[in-house]
Amino acid sequence: MISRKAQAISPSATLAIDSKFKSMKANGEDVVGFGAGEPDFDTPKHIKEAAIEAINTGKTKYTPAAGTLELRRTIAEKFKRENNLDYAPTDIVVSNGAKHSLVNTFMAICNPGDEVIIPAPFWVSYPEMVKLADGVPVIVNASEENDFKVTAKQLRAAVTDKTRAIIINSPSNPTGMVYTREELKDIADLAVEKNLYVVSDEIYEHLIYEGQRASIASFNEKIKDLTIIVNGVSKTYAMTGWRIGYTASNGDIAKVMANIQSHATSNPNSIAQAAAVAALEGGLECVEEMKKHFLERRNYMVEKINSLNGVSCKNPHGAFYVMMNISGLIGKEYYGTVINTSDDFAQLFLEIAGVAVVPGTGFAAPEYVRWSYATSMENVREGLCRLEKFLNNEY
């Protein structure tokens, strides 16, 4: 017999579409992929050199479960320098990627039946992680008219006596939208009033093109004590495969998360931890260079999509995603197939035009598809050229 809880967990839609794309590409098919949220740039040289030095100097043994003291000190210094937040190394837990950090977080704060409010559209893994921790996902829908952001008023209406936490993801995957300081302050005030945890996923914090970067934990000590910040080096430093994420929280939560991790995975990779120190200490010059390319791609993608009939999109202010509205295509027939859902569109678009995008169904956005512009400008132009031909029935 298989666990009922395990059977209730849905596979990751983003990884599924990326896997199919890579399989088609490996078979020699002419495909262009916009599925994975993975920077197409190489990991900066100084970070790779730090990893090589770690190998050569024997940093290949077990580390403390919560991460090396050196890395936790470096992360604490990062929070002070970049976010004006004071954390001790004991408040930091380093994990095998930010995804692992999130799993640890929900395992640490959820009791069976506890509700976690998740604004939608949401990253596909949030509800499944909550369910793995025996929590109950409560979805609050944000409208495109409000830039895919929920308000404190909406969140207040969803709070019950079972509510344990609210997830905030800014900049957002999949929408790329960024909460303003004022919007975050309203949510922070609600969390303090209701004594709710805030799980603040800030993995894209350095990929903001307009507006100011802000952490919800920075407003006062009360909200800081209730906030679990989740971050990592994957998106900022093009280190997706290195698998280093981290949390910052009050010491009691951090201790519980470290205990959980000690029994699940022990410590994160020792060599990758040394590389993460170099990343966080090496400045943001390499990040700014990547941002220039992301911004160019975003601007081209948004302008092109909004010039086509039947589709549209908002201009995202962060991350590297565009949510394309396909509601104008629903019910219409293309290439002998009626498009009823974003899954239909994504499958047909891949089959006919050889372009992989992620259907919005897994994001609780069934009339949208997500494009990732973490790919070359050449691919962006080619993919959107194919979209135009597809919509014009030119294949």
Image (tube, rainbow, N blue to C red):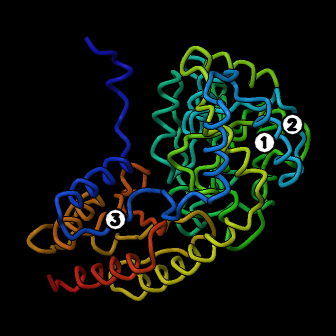
The answer to whether residue 248 is visible is yes
Q: Going from the N terminus, do you reach mark 1 or mark 3 first?
A: 3
The image quarter containing residue 21 is bottom left
Q: Nearer the viewer, residue 2 or 186?
A: 2
Instruction: Give the Cα separation between the discs numbered 1 and 3.
Output: 33 Å
Residue 264, horizontal then vertical, whole percent: 54, 18
Left or right relative to 311: residue 302: right
Instruction: Give the Cα separation between the discs numbered 1 and 2.
Output: 9 Å
- Of the 4 image quadrants, the one containing the C terminus is bottom left
Q: Which is more foreground, mark 1 or mark 2?
A: 1
Name the residue rendered at 73%, 68% in the picture: 285
Residue indicated by mark 3: 33
Residue indicated by mark 2: 87
Direction bottom: furthest residue: 307
Mark 2 residue crowding within 10 angstroms, few (<14) / some (14–19) / many (20+): many
Name the residue rendered at 67%, 65% in the picture: 287
Amino acid identity at mark 1: Ile
Q: Going from the N terminus, do you reach mark 2 or mark 3 first?
A: 3
Is the C-beta separation of discs 1 and 2 under 8 Å? Answer: yes
Q: Nearer the viewer, residue 344 or 91?
A: 91
Mark 1 residue crowding within 10 angstroms, few (<14) / some (14–19) / many (20+): many
Amino acid identity at mark 3: Gly
Residue 244, horizontal then vertical, whole percent: 61, 40
Residue indicated by mark 1: 75
